[in-house]
Image: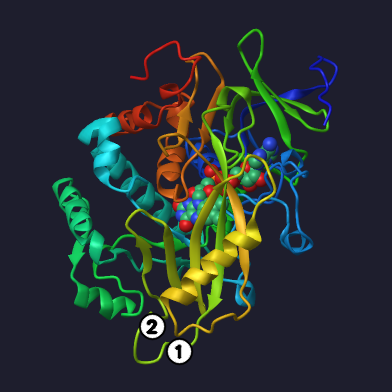
Amino acid sequence: MAKKETTTANLMQDRYDVVVIGGGTTGAAAAYHLSKAGVNNMLCLEMGRPGEGRTQPEHVRQDSPLTAEDESFYVPNFSGSRVFEGGSKGPRTIKMIVTLPPYEMLDGFADLFGWDGVKTYLDLAESGLKQQLDLANQYLPDPKQQIKQDGSLMVCEPDRADRLKQEYEFLQKLECPCEWWEEEHVVDAHGSAAGYVAGIWFPQHARIDSVTYAKVLLDAAVQSGSLTLKQECSPVVDVKDSEAGDHVVIQLADGELIQASQAIIATGGMYMDKYLAGILTPRYSYLAALPHRDPGPMGGMQAPNSANFFTLGFSHDWCVTDNFVRISGEDHYSGLKSPRAKQRCGRLAQWGWEKYPYLEFGADYPATYGIYSETPDFMPLVGKTTQNSGICYMVGCNAWGQASLSAAASLAPALLGYRDLSEAEKQTADLLSIRRFSARSTTPSS
Ligand SMILES: Cc1cc2nc3c(=O)[nH]c(=O)nc-3n(C[C@H](O)[C@H](O)[C@H](O)COP(=O)(O)OP(=O)(O)OC[C@H]3O[C@@H](n4cnc5c(N)ncnc54)[C@H](O)[C@@H]3O)c2cc1C
């Protein structure tokens, strides 16, 4: 889409205090926290609908070869906060919230950030999880249905049991709330068919309807009078600091220009400016929901309200919910090509049928995918690239980024200068700081 030049003629007269770009879970939470901090002249620009956004589909290459079969699967890219639609179309609450950094084991993370870094990450993810659950309990219309705090169990096959035990010992030393489960306990909760023999139980972990969560947080900010929500707007194509350095100019694809004192970029899966190229990698993530019936005496997983399960190394996560076994995994680097949804979702389904033979092999199942973006160290990019910039990033995560992104969003008022950071928040901001990668970095992050 051709960009229009910035001229004073097409600049809007009004200047917002803050424009939040992206109305997924991160942008919605950032807008909410800012509104609670008393910022009352804000705009949220969302090119889709809050929590179920569409992420720059026009930027996805359409030239990769698609078979006729694949084409029927091809839909625009949905944002990471979007999940199944509910009812027979698949379970809405898919988002477990885990507190682990996304390395196979904590020592991998410690190699990069030291054990202090591991502790800081676990603490910030735990506080992000708590904050998200508190807000969800306060604002979701039907918290019992929309939040399932049933814990999660990380499991392994016999040849990895020693590694899992070592991971548990690391977690214990770091005072992460979790328990070691022997085989008998794992089989009780999970059935015997899949052959998992040991587990680490995280009682706090939850699943939440994150689409509705994003909507209700934005609604709360709108109702307080502090936020205007512009949904299904023309996509934002450029955000830059003004030459005088006293405001930010946001350009939409249709040429509209919007001014703000500061902006937050919370666009999730797709990076939208050149400073993030090479740091953020867009990825597709796939989901399949296999119909789940009575498991019978052996090998079946329990429902309803069962835990979320995931493997050591996180190749798959799954749970029984709303008459489905919802399975995630099969992420793949997007390269802005068409997603390989049919193959990837098919492999998830195959995995489910192999692990749990009581499921009806070959039954029709809902499947979907979304886009998210990953940094080289799997943590979000948070903050400003230079102290004088008016642009604050909150992008990038991993396929289970809600906890760390929720912690980041709660920092929005401090990162934008409306209040000071506490000591704990400083550590969070330093660990997640965008300056750990930015070539534009002019000052140390602490
Ligand atoms: C299939 C899938 C499953 C996942 N499962 C989990 C999980 O179980 N647990 C977990 O914690 N995380 C999970 N994730 C990761 C997930 O993406 C994040 O945790 C979370 O959704 C990120 O929220 P966000 O608001 O940062 O980004 P998004 O949800 O992607 O929201 C970004 C918003 O910005 C809008 N936007 C983008 N570009 C523009 C633009 N140029 N102009 C205007 N608006 C724009 C989009 O429309 C979108 O609404 C999953 C991701 C995928 C794809």
Q: Mark 1 and 2 residues: CB-CB less than 8 Å, in contact?
A: yes
Q: CA distance from mark 1 to mark 2?
A: 8 Å
Pick the front one: 89 or 49: 89
- The type of residue carrying mark 1 is Asp
80 up-or-down from 234: above or below: below
Residue at horizontal 21%, vertical 36%? 115
The quarter of the rendered structure image containing the N terminus is top right
Q: Is residue 94 above or below residue 296?
A: above
Can residue 338 be seen? Answer: yes
**Residue at 77% from the left image edge and 45% from the top image edge:** 62
Q: Is residue 344 left or right of residue 57?
A: left
Q: Position of residue 273 (x, y in %)?
A: 63, 26
The answer to whether one can see residue 141 in this image is: no
In front here: 298 or 171? 298
At numbered mark 1, what does the secondary structure look like: helix, strand or loop? loop
User: In the image shown, does 405 or 354 lie closer to the viewer?
Assistant: 354
Identified at 35% across, 79% down, the residue is 193
Residue 203: x and y, percent? Answer: 28, 63
> Is the C terminus in the top left, top right, bottom left or bottom right quadrant?
top left
* Amino acid at pointer 2: Gly
Residue 427 in percent (x, y) is at: 30, 30
> How many marks can you see?
2
388, 293: nearer the viewer: 293
Q: Residues within 10 Å of mark 2 (few under 14, many from 20)?
A: many
- Identify the disc placed on residue 300: 2
Q: Is residue 248 above or below residue 157?
A: above
Q: Residue at x 24, y 70 (%)?
A: 197
Numbered label attached to residue 55: none
Residue denoted by label 1: 294
> Sequence order check: which comes first, mark 1 or mark 2?
1
Secondary structure under the numbered disc 2 in the rendered image: loop
